[in-house]
Image (cartoon, grey):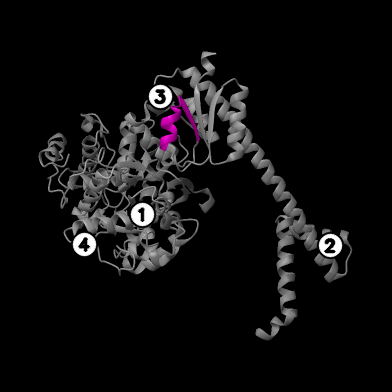
Amino acid sequence: MADKDLNILVIDEDPGRAMLLEEALVDAGYTHVVTIQSTTNLHQRIAALAPDMVIVDLQNPDRDTLEGMFQVTKSVKKPIAMFVDQSDGEMIRRAVEAGVSAYVVDGLKRDRVQAVVDVAVNRFETFQRLTDERDAARNALADRKTIDRAKGLLMQHRKISEDDAYKLMRGAAMKQSRKLVDIAQSIITAMELDAQLMDGGRDAI
Amino acid sequence: MPFDKYSAVRAGYVALTDCAPLIVAQELGFDRQAGIKLEPVLLKSWTAVRDGLAFEQLECAQMPGALALAMHLGISGLRVPVRAPLMLGHGGNAITVSTKLYEEGVALLGGEHEGPRGESGVLVRLVAEQRKLRGERRIRIGAVHAFSSHNYEVRAWLAHAGIDPDTDVELIVVPRSKMVEALATGEIDGFCVGDPWGQLAVEAGIGHIVATKADLYPYSPEKVLAFRDTWVKGHQDVAEATVKAIAQGLEWAGQEENHEELAFILSNKDYLNVPAPILMRTLSCKPQLAPGAGETLVPRYLEFGGDCLPTKAGALWLLAQMRRWGQAEAGFEKDLGTIFQPFTRVIGADPEQDNSVNEDPGRMAFDGVPFTASDIEAYRHNFAASGQS
């Protein structure tokens, strides 16, 4: 129980990731977790919450503010420091790679810190993987749309079958060692220019 | 050797005009000429820059000299020995107060402040006294990082006007990207930050620039190019090539005929994302100090080129500021090592001369307290003696 009554403050501009982390901490038995996204009145909120640990994403622009606050120990009640102990090298490295930074009350036991940081690192890694997968899926969908469109244009202009249009593009991609989607994009651009010229743009040239 | 085989050097920077030497070194290919591939990495806080360097996500970075020193001494974040062989220019900071505070101050003073800009803190003092009488909240001033020249400059400027920066006003750290907005909403009443942010506040009609770094400590160190010392020792050639490329960027950025092109490059959304004409004011040392006013020539407002070799005296000057404002214990003088020592093989640096303590970073200081590099404690006590807390 003593390990789980830490006051933990999560500051994250990404609401999805913040929610994921808060849930994981609560699941792990930490009952005093507060999450904030907006950092308005950060100073007053931290003074009121008096957190034992602050977890904040590494790229958060408010980190300078946090550190500035912790410098002035009298206004925050307790001195807080980021991991400054060289012996925590491995924990720090993993955290940095995952994009997690943490501030802890001076004197907090290492294993208690480690347990919370581990949860945060795992959740940040999970979130990153999900984001990457989502982006990859989005890109794949966009690619397919581009390829389909180029295929349609070829079929229309060259009066060829869908299969032949696809073979034509794939052949060009292999010959030029370029991606199929790049070839498709080139075809679309060329056809669009063509259409503009047909539309009377010719007079302007 | 093909370019893609060149050593990649990740260089952290933040969106401030003095990231220019680093950006142009990459944009104009000075990096390729030196045999490296510079990869600028934009970061949103100085803390992220410091940690990126400490935890080996970056090889080098633009950094406030004070933060590089604090990292080196283990006062800020992980203690990591630093080597900063080049400064990235001079000046560039401005103290801006809200138009509201400015007008209140002028009314209380009975007219525009006409003395040297270094003494304009009187406006803040008069308004602070009024607010205290009326029981209103203290004047709140933003700076960008506790370990930065901006913090020391605004503190010294306040103290010079008889204001205790820790009790009479509230100094808080605000991310530079939120500074102008915070001034507009009244969350803060003023700030000290590097350009273009001061210029943007004046342009928006919400702020008056009342003092600049050039008015306060024109020869004190500003940003440096910082490396991890252990990385330098293991990659001396690459580190030297990096300094060579960025020093070339510094020289190019310092030439007036290049300023329009520089403003154009920096105005890109990937860099500062600020209109080029506004950047030109800073680059030409002709900032706009008040809304609607014309440009004012402020010599040394922001300078690239010139003497950009760091000195041990410069490190001592920064350490003295840390001592003055209670950020460091006494006795760190012996731990400076080679932090501010140039590379002898690059740009013809003479270690004997350039790293001497003879150069005085405190010359022409507005506060009238002579800097004594050989005895920073004496320097510190002189402020108390002259009533500048």
Quarter that holds the N terminus of chain A = top right
Mark pair 1, 2: CA separation: 53 Å
For this view, does A198 lie left or right of residue A59? Answer: right
Residue in the picture at 43% in, 19% down: A108
Q: Which residue is mark 2?
A: A165
Residue B295 sits inside the magenta stretch:
no
Q: Are marks 1 and 4 in contact (CB under 8 Å)?
A: no
Mark pair 3, 2: CA separation: 62 Å
Kindly indicate whether the residues beneath marks 3 and 2 are on one polypeptide chain.
Answer: yes
Instruction: Look at the image and give the residue range highlighted in magenta.
Output: A43-56
Residue A85 is tagged as 3
Residue in the picture at 61% in, 34% down: A19
Q: Nearer the viewer, residue B273 or A87?
A: B273
Quadrant hosting residue A73: top left
Mark pair 1, 3: CA separation: 32 Å
Where is B291 relative to B332, above or below? Answer: below
Judging from the image, what secondary structure is the residue with disc 4 in?
Answer: loop
Residue A51 sits inside the magenta stretch:
yes
Q: Residues within 10 Å of mark 2 (few under 14, many from 20)?
A: many
Of tags 4 and 3, the one toward the viewer is: 4
Mark pair 2, 4: CA separation: 76 Å
Mark pair 1, 4: CA separation: 31 Å
For this view, does B53 lie left or right of residue B281? Answer: right
Q: Which residue is mark 1?
A: B18
Q: Amino acid at mark 3?
A: Asp
Q: Which residue is mark 4?
A: B112
Residue B305 in view (yes/no): no
Kindly indicate whether the residues beneath marks 1 and 4 are on one polypeptide chain.
Answer: yes
Q: Amino acid at mark 4?
A: Glu
Mark count: 4
Q: Earlier in the sequence, mark 3 or mark 2?
A: 3
